[in-house]
Image (cartoon, rainbow, N blue to C red):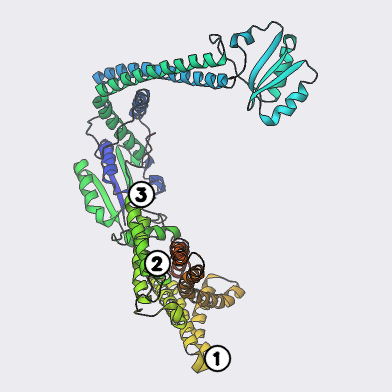
Amino acid sequence: MLFLNCLTHKRYARELFSRLCSLEAVELCDIRKTPLYKNGYLLSMGSEGIEEDVVTIKNRLSRIFQNLDAQPPPLRCEPPQVGGDTLISLEEEETLKEVERSAARLGVTREVLLRSKERIRTYLSKVESLFGMDLRIEDLRDLKYLYYSFGIVPSAQMPRLLRSLEDLPHVVVPVRGEYVFVFGLKRDKDKIDEILKTVFFERLELPKRYRGEPESVAKLMELELKRVDLALESLKLRMRRLFLEKERFLNDLWHRVVWRYISIEVRKLCGRTGSLIAFSGWVPETEKEKVERLIDEVCDGRAIYEWLGGRDLPQGLSPPTLFKNKPYFKPFEVLVRLYGIPTYGEVDPTPFIALSYPLFFGFMFGDLGQGGVLYLLSEFGKRRFPSLKDIFSLLKWCSIFSMIFGILYGHLFGFESVFKPILFSPIHDIPSIMMISLGFGVFFITLGYLLSAFTRYRIYGFGSEFLLDKHGVAGLLLFLALVFALLFLGKLGAFSALLLLPPMIMIYLGFKERTADKMERFFSPLIFLLENFSNAVSFIRLGAFALNHSFLFLAFLMLGEMLKASFMGEFGTAIMVFLGNAVVILFEGFIVSIQALRLNLYEFFSKFYMGEGRPFKPLSYRDIEIG
């Protein structure tokens, strides 16, 4: 990753930033965080009057699209060529005003019709609650001595309403659900209204134009709804006709305005000095030539820029990380991101987990038939759910390793006698599968320490961080000493523990440089030794789950034999075999995938991977918030 500093005349800013957004190869840094700004060589970019015009026209266009019930067009990847500061000509301004007025009239009409439709729907729901009652709507309005109110009272408030009305002449008539009529004397109108407010009463009043029985009023409302719907359809056609007439004009102007707006937003990250502008950013080494050509082309060769890399990178700025993996490794980046993004200069663990994760899964879930089912599910998932393509690609590789180990184990849909195993059957050779599990642990933990030592050498050089740190050479030697001490325990007895002393002393000296706490320095090597032992032993779960895979199906097979002796016969056995495979594939497959992930993240990654970096986010028109 290279760091770019560039200085050019401000007249090139608009086109330059637009083209950089289109190129998507530069991650701009906030100029205020760079040494150039902190040392006082640059000032922040100020606002110009043209910016207000851009925002105003953008908002006007947005309202037009909204009033015409249309969506702004997707932004083209190539910015339009617009010379000078003139964004819109006088003729275009007149056309825009004309379209704006017409669209505003149509938009207001639509809002009126929609509000009317919503009101009628509300009235209809009120009237429907009165169905079956022997009354006329106008009779309720013409009551001479009585006052009434119709509406909704929450069920929880009904007891409170009845208690509050006890001292007044009243009648409460439940209608349906929470709908009620409340009748009282007209002289008590104000008191009743106050009581109704305290119980969150929602009054439902109908306009005076509705008269007659509830059923006939409802039919009238349904006719009104149909008329409103017809008016909306007619209005929609008029809106569509206007949009099609002015579509090209609106779309072209939208692209010009939005690209100008994007360049303004990007310019906020830049600095200025006099009539010059400056910007800084990160660029992948593979994109360096493209960026240079673009800057020279836009600025007519009148730009000064420098490239910094390696130890010349500015202090205080953290380079982003760009994943550069081959297509096979790409799906496994999802698992790496669960732990974190690689720090710049750190080893990318994606190629390693691309081997270890499906290997662990296949070892624990070795079955030719069940692996084949998972493969078919992965292919179906990739076609049916394209957005989850990476997840189903992971499942595909896991299923392939599952089928490979199924051949090695001689397993087909849980049965062990269909064909002879090439390696061994886990359930018949428990010591071997446990030793292989531990062997995997020793190999991957050793690999983790080697990668950690390599990373520390690349970052810190040949120093104490490389030699004496517990994740450097000292940690690697301590783990290897632990392995050999356990291997030779039978021959050397307690003397094998002497192999542990040199690397433990190295780790002690490393802690001595970093902490003054004597107790921490003394116990840290011992604690680290126990961690190594527990990490290696944790890999036994590979063999344990391989055995569990066999025993779980064996349990279903035994149940099938029991059903075979019952009235269900062979059919009962077939059901249990099918059910057993379904449970193993869905339930155990999920558990095994979690265990394979745990071994990678906690036992393997923890030895060499920090994952405290941040992803490379190039400047892109797709990421600018247009609003």
First in residue order: circle 1 vs circle 3: 3
For this orientation, the residue located farthest to the right is: 167
Snapshot quadrant of residue 460: bottom left
| Mark 1 and mark 3 residues within 8 Å of each other at the beta carbon | no
Disc 2 marks a residue whose amino acid type is Tyr
**Residue under label 3:** 387
Q: Residue at x 38, y 16 (%)?
A: 231
For this orientation, the residue located farthest to the bottom is: 491
Q: Residue at x 41, y 45 (%)?
A: 32
Query: How many other residues sit within 10 Å of disc 1, few (<14), some (14-19) or many (≥20)?
Result: few
Q: Is residue 9 visible?
A: no
Element under label 3? helix
- How far is mark 1 from mark 3, CA to CA? 58 Å
**Residue under label 1:** 494
Query: How many other residues sit within 10 Å of disc 3, few (<14), some (14-19) or many (≥20)?
Result: few
Q: Is residue 479 visible?
A: yes
**Residue under label 2:** 357
Q: Position of residue 590 (x, y in %)?
A: 46, 61
- Residue 474 located left or right of residue 394: right
Q: Position of residue 288 (x, y in %)?
A: 25, 53
In this view of the protein, which residue sits in the foreground, 456 or 417? 417
In this view of the protein, which residue sits in the foreground, 48 or 224? 224
Q: Position of residue 266 (x, y in %)?
A: 34, 40
